[in-house]
Image (spheres, rainbow, N blue to C red):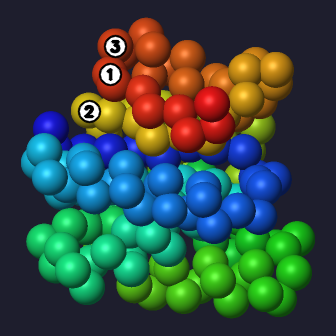
Protein backbone atom coordinates (compact mmCIF):
# COMPACT_ATOMS: atom_id res chain seq x y z
CA UNK A 1 0.00 0.00 0.00
CA UNK A 2 1.28 3.41 -0.91
CA UNK A 3 -1.52 6.00 -1.13
CA UNK A 4 -4.44 6.87 1.13
CA UNK A 5 -7.15 9.39 0.32
CA UNK A 6 -9.58 11.08 2.66
CA UNK A 7 -13.20 12.05 2.15
CA UNK A 8 -15.81 13.06 4.66
CA UNK A 9 -18.50 15.42 5.74
CA UNK A 10 -17.90 19.07 6.55
CA UNK A 11 -19.84 18.94 9.81
CA UNK A 12 -18.18 16.65 12.35
CA UNK A 13 -18.82 15.88 15.99
CA UNK A 14 -16.36 17.68 18.28
CA UNK A 15 -14.77 14.51 19.57
CA UNK A 16 -11.36 13.68 20.96
CA UNK A 17 -12.27 10.03 20.40
CA UNK A 18 -12.69 10.64 16.66
CA UNK A 19 -9.35 12.48 16.52
CA UNK A 20 -7.72 9.55 18.37
CA UNK A 21 -9.34 6.96 16.04
CA UNK A 22 -8.12 8.90 13.01
CA UNK A 23 -4.57 9.12 14.36
CA UNK A 24 -4.55 5.41 15.23
CA UNK A 25 -5.91 4.50 11.78
CA UNK A 26 -3.29 6.58 9.96
CA UNK A 27 -0.51 5.08 12.11
CA UNK A 28 -1.78 1.57 11.30
CA UNK A 29 -1.71 2.42 7.59
CA UNK A 30 1.82 3.82 7.90
CA UNK A 31 2.85 0.56 9.58
CA UNK A 32 1.69 -1.41 6.53
CA UNK A 33 3.41 0.86 4.02
CA UNK A 34 1.29 3.98 3.41
CA UNK A 35 3.46 6.98 2.63
CA UNK A 36 1.31 9.33 0.54
CA UNK A 37 -1.87 10.89 1.93
CA UNK A 38 -4.29 12.82 -0.30
CA UNK A 39 -6.77 15.40 0.99
CA UNK A 40 -9.17 17.61 -0.95
CA UNK A 41 -8.80 20.79 1.08
CA UNK A 42 -12.42 21.06 2.21
CA UNK A 43 -13.66 22.11 5.63
CA UNK A 44 -14.39 19.47 8.27
CA UNK A 45 -12.99 16.00 7.64
CA UNK A 46 -10.42 17.07 5.02
CA UNK A 47 -9.03 19.69 7.40
CA UNK A 48 -8.87 17.27 10.34
CA UNK A 49 -7.14 14.60 8.24
CA UNK A 50 -4.60 17.01 6.76
CA UNK A 51 -3.76 18.42 10.20
CA UNK A 52 -3.36 14.89 11.57
CA UNK A 53 -0.98 13.84 8.77
CA UNK A 54 1.08 17.01 9.25
CA UNK A 55 1.26 16.33 12.98
CA UNK A 56 2.35 12.72 12.38
CA UNK A 57 5.14 13.85 10.04
CA UNK A 58 7.17 14.73 13.14
CA UNK A 59 7.21 11.05 14.13
CA UNK A 60 7.12 9.64 10.58
CA UNK A 61 9.11 12.13 8.48
CA UNK A 62 8.83 10.02 5.31
CA UNK A 63 5.07 10.41 4.99
CA UNK A 64 3.76 13.08 2.63
CA UNK A 65 0.59 15.19 2.48
CA UNK A 66 -0.69 15.98 -1.00
CA UNK A 67 -3.53 18.45 -1.46
CA UNK A 68 -5.73 17.90 -4.50
CA UNK A 69 -7.77 21.07 -4.67
CA UNK A 70 -10.84 21.48 -6.89
CA UNK A 71 -9.84 25.01 -8.03
CA UNK A 72 -7.43 27.79 -7.02
CA UNK A 73 -7.24 28.20 -3.25
CA UNK A 74 -8.39 31.82 -3.27
CA UNK A 75 -11.58 30.79 -5.06
CA UNK A 76 -12.17 27.70 -2.94
CA UNK A 77 -11.93 29.67 0.31
CA UNK A 78 -13.69 32.88 -0.82
CA UNK A 79 -16.73 32.41 1.45
CA UNK A 80 -14.86 30.95 4.44
CA UNK A 81 -14.45 32.83 7.71
CA UNK A 82 -10.99 34.14 8.77
CA UNK A 83 -10.27 31.22 11.12
CA UNK A 84 -11.13 28.65 8.44
CA UNK A 85 -8.93 30.47 5.94
CA UNK A 86 -6.04 30.61 8.42
CA UNK A 87 -6.24 26.84 9.05
CA UNK A 88 -6.43 26.18 5.31
CA UNK A 89 -3.39 28.35 4.49
CA UNK A 90 -1.39 26.78 7.32
CA UNK A 91 -2.10 23.35 5.84
CA UNK A 92 -1.41 24.49 2.28
CA UNK A 93 1.95 26.00 3.30
CA UNK A 94 3.06 22.74 4.97
CA UNK A 95 1.77 20.28 2.36
CA UNK A 96 4.34 18.36 0.36
CA UNK A 97 2.47 19.10 -2.87
CA UNK A 98 -0.55 21.09 -4.01
CA UNK A 99 -2.41 20.34 -7.23
CA UNK A 100 -5.39 22.26 -8.60
CA UNK A 101 -7.46 19.83 -10.65
CA UNK A 102 -9.26 22.74 -12.37
CA UNK A 103 -8.00 26.20 -13.21
CA UNK A 104 -11.31 27.80 -12.18
CA UNK A 105 -14.46 26.96 -10.26
CA UNK A 106 -17.11 25.26 -12.39
CA UNK A 107 -20.01 22.89 -11.82
CA UNK A 108 -17.96 19.72 -12.07
CA UNK A 109 -14.64 20.71 -10.44
CA UNK A 110 -15.57 19.07 -7.11
CA UNK A 111 -16.41 15.79 -8.86
CA UNK A 112 -13.13 16.03 -10.78
CA UNK A 113 -11.26 16.55 -7.48
CA UNK A 114 -13.07 13.59 -5.89
CA UNK A 115 -12.13 11.36 -8.83
CA UNK A 116 -8.48 12.48 -8.56
CA UNK A 117 -8.44 11.58 -4.86
CA UNK A 118 -9.69 8.06 -5.54
CA UNK A 119 -7.41 7.61 -8.55
CA UNK A 120 -4.35 8.44 -6.41
CA UNK A 121 -5.20 5.98 -3.64
CA UNK A 122 -5.02 2.32 -2.69
CA UNK A 123 -7.11 2.95 0.42
CA UNK A 124 -9.68 5.46 1.64
CA UNK A 125 -10.27 6.73 5.17
CA UNK A 126 -13.65 8.39 5.34
CA UNK A 127 -16.22 9.84 7.67
CA UNK A 128 -19.42 8.96 5.84
CA UNK A 129 -22.99 8.66 7.03
CA UNK A 130 -24.84 6.67 4.37
CA UNK A 131 -28.07 8.54 5.16
CA UNK A 132 -26.70 11.25 2.86
CA UNK A 133 -25.83 9.22 -0.29
CA UNK A 134 -26.07 12.18 -2.68
CA UNK A 135 -23.36 14.19 -0.93
CA UNK A 136 -19.90 14.66 -2.41
CA UNK A 137 -18.66 12.26 0.24
CA UNK A 138 -21.19 9.65 -0.87
CA UNK A 139 -20.13 10.15 -4.47
CA UNK A 140 -16.45 9.71 -3.57
CA UNK A 141 -17.11 6.58 -1.49
CA UNK A 142 -19.00 5.05 -4.45
CA UNK A 143 -16.01 5.84 -6.71
CA UNK A 144 -13.74 4.01 -4.25
CA UNK A 145 -16.14 1.05 -4.09
CA UNK A 146 -16.13 0.86 -7.89
CA UNK A 147 -12.30 0.91 -7.88
CA UNK A 148 -12.44 -1.82 -5.20
CA UNK A 149 -9.98 -0.19 -2.84
CA UNK A 150 -10.09 -0.67 0.91
CA UNK A 151 -12.47 1.76 2.65
CA UNK A 152 -12.18 2.51 6.36
CA UNK A 153 -15.22 4.45 7.58
CA UNK A 154 -14.73 6.09 10.97
CA UNK A 155 -18.36 7.28 11.13
CA UNK A 156 -19.61 3.79 12.00
Q: Secondary structure at mark 2?
A: loop
Lateral position of residue 43 relative to residue 114, left or right: right
Q: Name the residue at 32% across, 45% down.
A: 4
Pointer 2 or 1: first along the chain: 2
Point out residue 152 in the picture as x, y percentages from the top left corner.
Answer: 44, 33
The image shows residue 155, relative to residue 65, as above or below, that is above
**On the image, numbered disc 1 is attached to which residue?**
149
Lateral position of residue 41 relative to residue 132, left or right: left
The image shows residue 154, relative to residue 43, as above or below, that is above
Q: Name the residue at 43% across, 10% down.
A: 146
Q: Name the residue at 82% across, 89% down.
A: 82
Q: Name the residue at 56% across, 63% down.
A: 19
Q: Secondary structure at mark 3?
A: loop
**On the image, numbered disc 3 is attached to which residue?**
148
Work out whether residue 5 or residue 113 is closer to the camera in this orientation and state it: 5
Tally the numbered discs. 3
Work out whether residue 80 or residue 11 is closer to the camera in this orientation and state it: 11
**On the image, numbered disc 2 is attached to which residue?**
122
Q: CA distance from mark 2 to mark 1?
A: 6 Å
Pointer 2 or 3: first along the chain: 2
Q: Quadrant of the N terminus?
A: top left
**Mark 2: few/some/many CA within 10 Å (<14, 14-19, 20+):** some
Point out residue 39 in the picture as x, y percentages from the top left corner.
Answer: 47, 55
Q: Quadrant of residue 129?
A: top right
Work out whether residue 108 or residue 119 is closer to the camera in this orientation and state it: 119
Amino acid sequence: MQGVCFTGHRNLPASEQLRHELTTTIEMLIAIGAEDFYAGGALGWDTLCAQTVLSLQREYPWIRLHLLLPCPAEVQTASWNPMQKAEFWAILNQANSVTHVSESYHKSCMRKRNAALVEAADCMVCFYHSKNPHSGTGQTVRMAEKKEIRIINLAK
